[in-house]
Amino acid sequence: MPRRLQALAARFPSLPLVLLVSVCLTSLGARAAWLGAPCQSPCRTATDHVLIFDERYYVNAARVIAGIRPPLGSPYADSPLGVDPNAEHPQLAKLAIAGSIELFGDGPFAWRLGSLVAGTLAIIGIFALVRAGGAGRWPALVAAALMAADNLMIVHGRIGTLDVYALAAMIWGAAFYVRGRPLLAGAVIGIGLCTKLVVAYVLFALALLEVLRWLAARERPVVRLRRLAGCAATAAGVFVGLLAVLDRVARPYDDTARKLIGGGPFRHLGHMVSYAAHQTSPDGPRGIASYPWGWLVDYKPITYLNVNPARPAAGLDHVHPAVHFLGLISPPILLLALPALALAAAGALRGRLGPGRELATLALAWFAGTFVPFVLLSLFWSRTSYLYYMVIVMPGFYVAAAWLLTTINRWPRMTALWVICVIAAAVIAYPLTPLP
């Protein structure tokens, strides 16, 4: 089987690109299908469509920016029109949703179009990132296919929240950096920071990547430091400059204090940091919150929305069809990616990563750079955290699994069985799969 696949790959060198297009189109189709579901019967107006999870904050904030009053009782229903009442996050992604609302009307297509686009860009971006890391087209295709098949990506690549916008910027910023374009990478990261501040974690990943490269090569670190500093400085400059522009387009508004946040981008940044610092759980996680180390075993999945027309929950009467949006990482992907990361770490410590060293190093750096900050914040500051924060950590898992699959090919039957499990998990966890 491996020999036949290698022969096929040699005969059709462009086949991975054709399959990448197929993966992107399949993913886009799966995420776009029934985009307006669920909806109150009869489904006639925008407010009949049910918002999913944190859409109630971001879609309503976009409505306010676009000059539309949210329904009575919704978040930001009393905020002044034209401002951004969700000032704890930068405006860019919400402005994208607001612009879509103005173009296509206040409805689910407008709310979720940006996520469809950003999700597809993220899949293409991880292909580009793996290729930039020196791997071939097949490992890059595997990483892209795993991202497309992961339930967490399917859900967040469909709903109108901020995470997938941030993810796409992080992946493309890293791809440009690894490709040797640090200033362009910094510009992309700076733009991404204007969607969600967590994009800064990719700079930690890039710093770790440079450290691991330096330990492997044992060369002078001056060039690496200069490249990293240039990327970080560009990201900071683009972020501050763009945030200043965004503050003029949609003025930040503190909905709790009922006042505008003036004083320029640094005052707005201070508000965002202060808000995040107060999101703590000193007595331990409650409700849907969880510790970061629990995420590695899918501890405490989050039900974003569960509609069962036969047994409707409170407030979901006459809502159709049945849906189950679940914040859950694909278990088969975790099952392979965790050992892959462990093997990559052991190989890096011993200096025995072999021909796939760069790809394994990239996976390790991404995982540590994006996951460890959540752990430290939880340990030392009792920061409240949720499983869906893993959206930005998962690229390290996809790359690690791709590295392991393409470097260890001794068990083709086990590999085939695992692929079937990945597909089955995607189908079973799909939000509109008609299962009990």
Image (cartoon, helix red, strand yellow):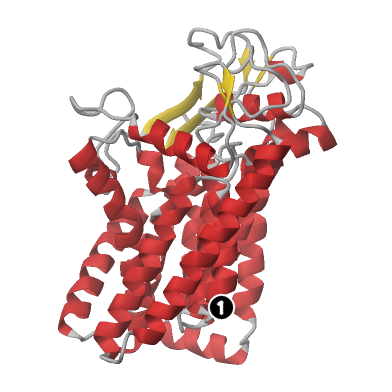
Q: Quadrant of the N terminus?
A: bottom left
Instruction: Give the quarter of the image for residue 278.
Output: top left
Q: Residue at x 67, y 58 (%)?
A: 25
Q: Quadrant of residue 402?
A: bottom left
* Residue 391 position within the rendered picture, expressed as x and y whole percent measured from the top left: 44, 48
Residue 246 occupies quadrant? top right
Left or right: where does residue 259 sit relative to residue 150? right
Q: Quadrant of the C terminus?
A: top left
Q: Is residue 235 left or right of residue 374?
A: right
The answer to whether residue 340 is above or below residue 83 is below
Q: Nearer the viewer, residue 79 or 177?
A: 79
Point out residue 392 in the picture as x, y percentages from the top left corner: 43, 52
Q: How many marks?
A: 1
Q: Residues within 10 Å of mark 1 (few under 14, many from 20)?
A: some
Q: Which residue is mark 1?
A: 181
Q: Does residue 209 sit above or below 55 in this rendering?
A: below
Q: Amino acid at mark 1?
A: Arg
Pinpoint residue 145: horizontal percent, then vertical percent.
Answer: 51, 63
Residue situated in front as seen by the camera: 283 or 84: 84
Q: Nearer the viewer, residue 251 or 68?
A: 251
Q: Position of residue 107 (x, y in %)?
A: 75, 28
Residue in the picture at 29% in, 33% down: 300
Task: Determine whether the residue tagged by mark 1 lies in a helix, strand or loop.
Answer: loop
